[in-house]
Image: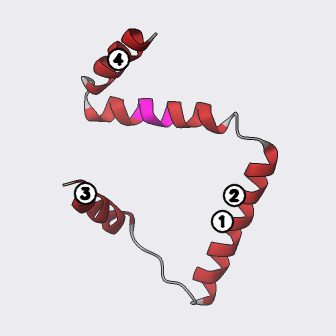
Amino acid sequence: MKSSLDQVAKDALALPANDQEVLAEKLVGSLVAHVPSEIKRLQLTEVMRRRAEIVSGRLEGVSAEQVVREIQALVR
C-alpha cells in the first residue's frame, strides 16, 4: 500500500501546478464529504462568529496574498 501511495504522490507532484491545485481541491472535497454533521455545524457557527467580528469592526480581515506571503515565509 505504501509504495502505491508513494507512487501516486510522486505522480501528483510531477503535475503542472494548476493540475496539482485541481487535484488538491478534489481531495479536500472528498474529505469534507465525510465530516460528521455536528462538526459541520460547529464549523459553520465559528465561520459566522468570525464574520460577525469582521463586520462589526472588532477584527480586521487579512488578504489571501498576505496569508500566502506569511506561509511562504514560515516554510523557507
In the rendered image, which residue does mark 4 sit on? 6
In the rendered image, which residue does mark 3 sit on? 72
Mark 3: which amino acid?
Gln
Mark 1 neighbour density, 10 Å: few (under 14) some (14–19) many (20 or more): few
Taking the image as shown, residue 66 lies to the left or right of residue 56, namely left
Taking the image as shown, residue 60 lies to the left or right of residue 48, namely left
In the rendered image, which residue does mark 1 sit on? 47
Mark 2: which amino acid?
Gln
- Could you tell me which secondary element the residue under label 2 belongs to? helix
Residue for point 60% across, 30% down: 30
Q: CA distance from mark 2 to mark 3?
A: 26 Å
Q: Position of residue 59 (x, y in %)?
A: 53, 84
Mark closer to the observer (3, 4):
4
**As drawn, which residue projects farthest toward the bottom?**
57
The residue segment tinted magenta is 22-26
Q: Are marks 1 and 2 in contact (CB under 8 Å)?
A: yes
